[in-house]
Amino acid sequence: MKVLIVYYSTFGNVCKMAKLVAEGVNQVEGAEAVIRRVPELMPEAVIQSREDTKAGAEMQKGVPVVTLDDFKEAGAIAFGTPTRFGNVSAQLKNQIDQLGSLWMQRIFEGKPAGVFVSTGTLHGGQESTILSLMNVLFHLGFVVVGVPYSVPDLYLTQGGGAPYGPDHVAGAENSREIDEHEANICRAFGKRLAEIGLKLNR
Ligand SMILES: Cc1cc2nc3c(=O)[nH]c(=O)nc-3n(C[C@H](O)[C@H](O)[C@H](O)COP(=O)(O)O)c2cc1C
């Protein structure tokens, strides 16, 4: 079963989280992580005008852009986004807004999906971003998945990570590295999504 990890990332933090979620997926026998990014909406000139945005784009050059076939073939989906004013990025939402034909075909009904997010600040909208995107997942027919408290890192984290889904606090300059607890929560989320996907797609 393919587990699609589809994300948007400007500076690279959500991209790094996607790889950690994939590690968790690939721990599960019978599951295969497929990492895809969504198209950029910012003009190329804006990206090229800053060192940090240029570096973020460079990091992701090798990641294929998601296709409708990727969504159709997935038995489970993880959606990753940086927060934008406490909400999902326009880039990821733009891609989701192109899923109307698959929604009409009921492609996602009964499949598990969840959300992971990176924010600049600790209380800058991790939970609100995840929960906002979950509204959309319910409409699409997904079985919505988070991270249960049997994952010990939920008790230990001083950064991101919540029962709603994995989070990372990237810091005001986007330079704070993903810490051990945030990484473990990403992996646990990927593993759980894959295990539930295998059960539901039986
Ligand atoms: C337009 C804009 C709005 C943002 N809004 C928030 C916000 O509401 N709260 C917050 O903590 N960080 C906010 N940030 C910071 C980003 O969430 C942070 O840079 C991001 O998590 C880094 O992810 P990335 O490296 O994958 O791009 C904002 C950044 C931009 C560019």
Image (cartoon, grey):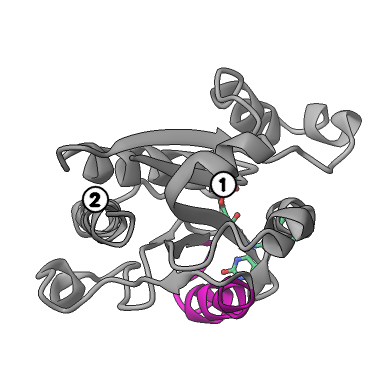
Label disc, if present, on residue 187 of the rendered structure: 2
x, y (%) of residue 140? 62, 69
Other residues around mark 1 within 10 Å, as few (<14) / some (14–19) / many (≥20): many
Instruction: Residue 90: tell me if it is visible.
Output: no
Q: Dot 1: what SS?
A: strand
Q: Residue at x 32, y 67 (%)?
A: 159
- Where residue 201 sits, quadrant-wise, is bottom left
Range shown magenta: 119-139
| Mark 1 Cβ and ligand 1 under 8 Å apart | yes
x, y (%) of residue 183? 26, 51
Q: Residue at x 19, y 52 (%)?
A: 180
- Where residue 192 sits, quadrant-wise, is bottom left
Q: Residue at x 46, y 53 (%)?
A: 77
Quadrant of the rendered image holding ligand 1 = bottom right
Q: Mark 1 sits on what residue?
A: 7
Amino acid on which the number 1 mark rests in the picture:
Tyr
**Residue 7, above or below 164:** above
Other residues around mark 2 within 10 Å, as few (<14) / some (14–19) / many (≥20): many
